[in-house]
Image: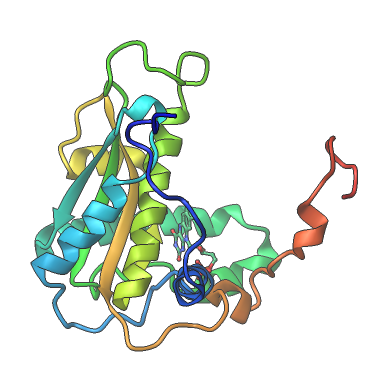
Amino acid sequence: MTAEPFLTDAGPFAEAERAAVYRAIHTRRDVRSQFTDRPINDATLLRLLTAAHHAPSVGLSQPWNFIVIRSEAVKLRAQTAFAKANAEAQAMFPEDRRALYSSLKLEGILTAPISLCVTCDHSRGGPVVLGRTHQPQMDVYSTVCAVQNLMLAARAEGIGVGWVSIFDPADMQQLLDLPNHVSAVAWLCLGHVDALYSEPELQAKGWAQRVPLADLVFAERWGRRA
Ligand SMILES: Cc1cc2c(cc1C)N(C[C@H](O)[C@H](O)[C@H](O)COP(=O)(O)O)c1[nH]c(=O)[nH]c(=O)c1N2
């Protein structure tokens, strides 16, 4: 029997390795306020970007780019775009939620040493992409997989990540000179952290609660309890 080329061993990880993977998943937090000003060195940033770049992508199209932002002027413009969108957002919530919404800190753009914009190039891979023929949005989903890889790797490195999405997309296009076929999927604030919330900050502050997993698992059909 000849061995299939390219296949490698795929047994379970050793116990400590498994524990480390789950620890990264369970202790990762979205960070808005805990960034220290300790710079992220280039080797660490490269490991994070490499982790992102090893994400799955539809048809192996790798639709992402990573824009590394260190300029205070660009961060300031992003913060201004956030503030404008956040004022609009506040007005969208029912009155009884507005005061709590306004009290939440929802970005750390100016305190995080690096902002990273992860973009999706909708033309990557050409006009017909394997796996994307019937669902064009798969390119954005792939890009989000890259973001998640980066967030988990960052947790292992002691680097906090905060995802800021309260922007008018048009402001992002302009701020970063994005061509029309490229979208900004995630604005991520990155910085070393010494402490993290032990539960989602939005839960700690009474905005929302984690739903019990059992409420979300169905068997065979929508709505049928497992
Ligand atoms: C696509 C997307 C977009 C955003 C977020 C997340 C994701 C996945 N989150 C963070 C979000 O509030 C957070 O993940 C949840 O509250 C759960 O908390 P932990 O991530 O476990 O800390 C987020 N947080 C915030 O303060 N401002 C924001 O604009 C956003 N935007």
Q: Quadrant of residue 36?
A: bottom left
- Write the residue at 15% across / 37% down: 177
**Above or below, 210 relative to 78:** below
- Write the residue at 28% across / 40% down: 119
- Write the residue at 78% across / 51% down: 217
Return the x and y of residue 33 as percentages of the image width and height.
Answer: 36, 79
Residue 104 makes an appearance in the image = yes
Q: Quadrant of residue 194?
A: bottom left
Judge by depth and name the residue closer to the eye, 124 or 111.
124
Q: Residue reaching furthest top?
A: 127
Q: How is the image coloured?
A: rainbow
Residue 75 makes an appearance in the image = no
Judge by depth and name the residue closer to the eye, 56 or 41.
56
**Above or below, 42 relative to 196:** above
Query: Which quadrant is home to the N terminus?
Result: top left
Q: Residue reaching furthest front?
A: 1
In the image, is 199 to the left or to the right of 78? right
**Above or below, 123 relative to 208:** above
Return the x and y of residue 189 as percentages of the image width and height.
Answer: 29, 65
Q: How many marks?
A: 0
Return the x and y of residue 45 as percentages of the image width and height.
Answer: 18, 63
**Above or below, 93 relative to 113:** above
- Write the residue at 36% across / 11% down: 128
Q: Residue reaching furthest bottom?
A: 194
In the image, is 138 to the left or to the right of 225? left
